[in-house]
Every structure is written in structure tokens, then in C-alpha cells.
């Protein structure tokens, strides 16, 4: 079926900690509390990548997590968007050049992966919601390309 | 062909069943939306708009449907369809507001009990067929829970059948149960109703009895490997089941109609006044909303998930005792 606008308003999110310090993870939880309430945009945290539309990765990818990250990415049904939360995922942040780090996510994921960044250390809940907005803009672009 | 013959005919029944199925799906998604909105408001959140479940389903049908290598494909794909069809068939055997059961005379309470049990079994088989350890644990939990809540549910059916001396749901819902018994029987049915309200969240696998799905511990449980279209069908099956169980409760214990108090008149169609039908339908939908609000939304907000052994104990011991006591009072009290 063709991607329609309904898709934007029903994004289900799977959260995977790929070796972060837990600060971003707490901010993700903050984004679903009554103060920010992302459920009003139809965003729901789900327990398995099979249900997900958005993969939410936090943290630089450690050696142990590399295979798991790739596997979770492959398990997610198309169409999917990757939302990298925090500086670590985009640049490895304070763990730069560490021996246990496999590098930022965009070097690991396949070339055609759709990656969107929400930066901050830790990222603020507002910025996570902004990241979702960027995901909407991205999906709009995909729809435009399909037409 | 005149109208009477047409309405008695099988073709009309088939058309009505299809129509009621679509209405059931629509109502289920609508009530799911209200449930989510009300839940959000009780948690001082804004919550998703009431249209959200429609969007969710539409989105799920747009997604890719993955069948894992470890799964048994035919069973994996059949489970969602069976889980959806059973409650849709049950709708045809239930009185809905002013309208009697479409399949009146072809099956009663016993059939409904079986139809209510089928979705849980289908979900468990789907989970087992998906070949994931999480789904296997979820399926086992679902079956354990099913075995626990079936007894209080069956006792309800037995007590009602004893009181009315029939299993026909049309006869049972033709007169409110509270009018047909004395003081003692009334208390007995109140106890049975309380047990049935406790069974409802278990039947619908909602918090506090959602151990089979348990997103925080089993990562989605039964549905862990389901995606796309299959997950969408399960989503619809779940919401239709909510309507079916609500309508079941209304038919057994609250079959009140406003038109019996005051006739609103209107043009007569096949022996029913038009305005009466409209008012009674609205009243039925309102009753359904109240039942879902009490048995799903309030309980979901108020409780956390039980451990599976505690949930099983809850149904096997306190609820079974309450419903047995209720049945005893009904039997001893007798008809008024």
C-alpha cells in the first residue's frame, strides 16, 4: 500500500540502548510523561522491533552491541526511520576514539538507512519531539518522491 | 416477495451479519479511541485524539508483513484471522440494543462462551507458531489465564440458565434479570455480576491481566513476531472483542430499553417505531461506553500488572468462590 499521511500520526517507537550512559534513556521516559505526553501525536513505545516504525538508538555503539543493533535494524519492517538520540550516537561524543566503541551509528547502518538526529548530552525531551517532527518532514519527502 | 418473507430469509441474515461485522469493527475502534483518551485524561495527559486507533490500523496495513524463518507460516497467518472471525460471529448471536440476535434460535449462551474462548486460543496458537521464546511464554500465560477465568464465566451462564430455564440469550435479555428474582437471588446476581466485571479485563487481556502481552517483561509476548497486516488484524480482533464482551454483559444484566418507559413514536417499520429504535440504539451505545469505562479504563489506570500466579489465584479462588456463592443464592432464592 502507498505511504499516506496517516503514517505520520501513528509512529510506534522501539527504543534500543546501544551502550549509552542512561542519561538519554531517562530523557526518553521524560518525553512520555504527562508534561510532554508524546502520545498526543500518536507516538507509542512498543516492546519489539517487529511493531516499530521508528528505531530510537541511544549511545555510541559498543563492540558487543554492534551485531544486535544491525539485527534489530533488519528485524524492523519497512518503511522505517532511525532516530539517533544524543551526541554519542551521531559522533560517539565523550567516548570518541575509545577502544570499546565501534563508531557512530551512521557508519554501521546500511547506506540506505534513513537516519535523523536529535542532539544533546543528554538530549532534552523537547529535542526528541523535534526529532519526531524531522521524521515527519522526512516521510513527507518520501511521499513526494513516490508520487 | 413481501417484507416478512425477506426478513425471515437466510440471504437477509447473511447481509445483516456482514453489516453488523463492519459496525462492530467501527464501534470497537471508536471505543478504543475513547478508552485511550479517557485513560490519558485520568493520568492528566492530553492523550491521542479519538481517531487514533483508525490511524494505527491503517498504518499497520501499510507496513511490511514479516513471517519469521522459525515460524510455521500457515498457522502463523491463520491465527489472526481466526481471532478476528470468532468475535464477529459472536456479534451475530448477541442482542444489540433494540435489535434481537440475528441468528436467534441457532445458538445461545453455550455457543457464546465457546466463541469468546476462541480468540484467546487462536492468539496462543499464533504465539506458539511464531517460534520465538518470548511468544511461547506469552502463549503459555494466555492459556493459563484462560483456564482461570473460564470457570467464573461458566458459573455465570449456569446461574442464568437455571433462573430462566433456557440458554437462549434472546429470552434472557427480554426481561432484566433483576426483575425475575427475589431479594436473595438479587444479591446472588449482584455477586455474579461483580465476578463478571473482574473477568472482563482478563478476557480482553487488559491491565492488570495482560501478562500474556506484558511489554515491559515479555516485549509484546504473544505478538512479539507479528508485524504489519497480521498485527493489524489482531488489533481489530482485540477491539471487536471489547464490544462483544460489553454487549454480552449488557444482554445478560442490563437489557434495559428507554422505549419501554416512554414511547417516542415515529413511523412504524416492521413492528418497531423509528424514534424508539434510534433512542434505544443511542442508549445501548451509552451503556457500552459506561461498561468499557468501568471494566477497562478505570481498572487499567488504577492497577498494575499482577504476577501470572497471583492473577490465576485471583480467578481460581476469590472470584470462583464469589460466583459460586452467587449461584447458590440464586438457586436457594428461586424465582420470585
Image (cartoon, coloured by chain):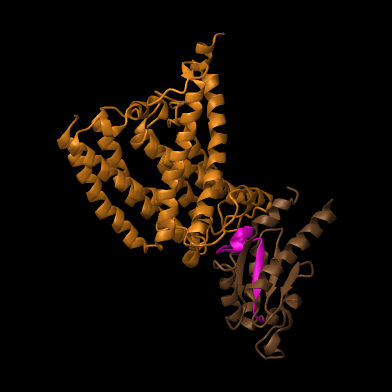
Horizontally, residue B320 falls left or right of residue A87, namely left
Position in image of residue B154 (x %, y %): 30, 41
Position in image of residue A46 (x %, y %): 57, 62
Span colored in magenta = A38-60
Q: Residue at x 22, y 43 (%)?
A: B326
- Image quadrant in which the N terminus of chain B is located: top right
Q: Residue at x 29, y 33 (%)?
A: B177
Q: Quadrant of residue A29?
A: bottom right
Q: Quadrant of residue A93?
A: bottom right
- Which residue occupies the foreground of this view, B98 or B248? B98
Residue B248 part of the magenta-drawn span: no
- Which residue occupies the foreground of this view, B76 or B308? B308
Q: Residue at x 33, y 37 (%)?
A: B253
- Image quadrant in which the C terminus of chain B is located: top left
Q: Colour of chain A?
A: brown
Q: Residue at x 64, y 63 (%)?
A: A75
Residue with the most extreme left position: B332
Position in image of residue B65 (x %, y %): 65, 52
Query: Is A21 placed above or below B173 here?
Result: below
Viewer can see residue B244: no
Position in image of residue B97 (x %, y %): 45, 31
Horizontally, residue A60 falls left or right of residue B322, namely right
Query: Is B143 placed above or below A101 here?
Result: above
- Which residue occupies the foreground of this view, B164 or B299? B299
Query: Is B93 placed above or below A120 here?
Result: above
Q: Colour of chain B?
A: orange
Amino acid at each position: 500500500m502507498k505511504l499516506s499521511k496517516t503514517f505520520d500520526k501513528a509512529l510506534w517507537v522501539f527504543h534500543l540502548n546501544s551502550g549509552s550512559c542512561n542519561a538519554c534513556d531517562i530523557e526518553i521516559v521524560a518525553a512520555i510523561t504527562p508534561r510532554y505526553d508524546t502520545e498526543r501525536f500518536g507516538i507509542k513505545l512498543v516492546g519489539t522491533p517487529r511493531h516499530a516504525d521508528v528505531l530510537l538508538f541511544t549511545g555510541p555503539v559498543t563492540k558487543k552491541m554492534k551485531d544486535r543493533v544491525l539485527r534489530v535494524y533488519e528485524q524492523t519492517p519497512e518503511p522505517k526511520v532511525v532516530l539517533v538520540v544524543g551526541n554519542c550516537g551521531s559522533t560517539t561524543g565523550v567516548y570518541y576514539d575509545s577502544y570499546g566503541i565501534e563508531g557512530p551509528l551512521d557508519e554501521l547502518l546500511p547506506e540506505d538507512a534513513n537516519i535523523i538526529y536529535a542532539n544533546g548530552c543528554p538530549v532534552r525531551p523537547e529535542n526528541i519531539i523535534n526529532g519526531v517532527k524531522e521524521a515527519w518532514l522526512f516521510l513527507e519527502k518520501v511521499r513526494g518522491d513516490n508520487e | 416477495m413481501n417484507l416478512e418473507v425477506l426478513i425471515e430469509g437466510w440471504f437477509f441474515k447473511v447481509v445483516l451479519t456482514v453489516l453488523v461485522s463492519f459496525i462492530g469493527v467501527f464501534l470497537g475502534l471508536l471505543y478504543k479511541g475513547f478508552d485511550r483518551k479517557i485513560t490519558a485524561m485520568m493520568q492528566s495527559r492530553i492523550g491521542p485524539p479519538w481517531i487514533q486507533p483508525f490511524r494505527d490500523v491503517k498504518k499497520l496495513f501499510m507496513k511490511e508483513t514479516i513471517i519469521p524463518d522459525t515460524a510455521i507460516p500457515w498457522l502463523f497467518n491463520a491465527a489472526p484471522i481466526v481471532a478476528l472471525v470468532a468475535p464477529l460471529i459472536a456479534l451475530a448471536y448477541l442482542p444489540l440494543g433494540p435489535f434481537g440476535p440475528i441468528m436467534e434460535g441457532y445458538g445461545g449462551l453455550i455457543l457464546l462462551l465457546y466463541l469468546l474462548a476462541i480468540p484467546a486460543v487462536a492468539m496462543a496458537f499464533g504465539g506458539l507458531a511464531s517460534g520465538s521464546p518470548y511468544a511461547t511464554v506469552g502463549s503459555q500465560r494466555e492459556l493459563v489465564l484462560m483456564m482461570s477465568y473460564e470457570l467464573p464465566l461458566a458459573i455465570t451462564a449456569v446461574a442464568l440458565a437455571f433462573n430462566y430455564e433456557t440458554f437462549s440469550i434472546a429470552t434472557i435479555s427480554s426481561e432484566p434479570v433483576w426483575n425475575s428474582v427475589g431479594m436473595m437471588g438479587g444479591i446472588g446476581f449482584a455477586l455474579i455480576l461483580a465476578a463478571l466485571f473482574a473477568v472482563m479485563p482478563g478476557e480482553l487481556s487488559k491491565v492488570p491481566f495482560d501478562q500474556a502481552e506484558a511489554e515491559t517483561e515479555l516485549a509484546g509476548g504473544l505478538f512479539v513476531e507479528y508485524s504489519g497486516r497480521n498485527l493489524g488484524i489482531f488489533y481489530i480482533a482485540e477491539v471487536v472483542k471489547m464490544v462483544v464482551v460489553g454487549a454480552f454483559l449488557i444482554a445478560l444484566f442490563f437489557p434495559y430499553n428507554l422505549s419501554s418507559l416512554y414511547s417516542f413514536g415515529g413511523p412504524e417499520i416492521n413492528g418497531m417505531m423509528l424514534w424508539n429504535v434510534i433512542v434505544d440504539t443511542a442508549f445501548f451505545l451509552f451503556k457500552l461506553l459506561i461498561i468499557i469505562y468501568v471494566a477497562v479504563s478505570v481498572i487499567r489506570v488504577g492497577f498494575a500488572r499482577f504476577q501470572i500466579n497471583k492473577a490465576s489465584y485471583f480467578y481460581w479462588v476469590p472470584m470462583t468462590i464469589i460466583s459460586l456463592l452467587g449461584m447458590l443464592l440464586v438457586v436457594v432464592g428461586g424465582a420470585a
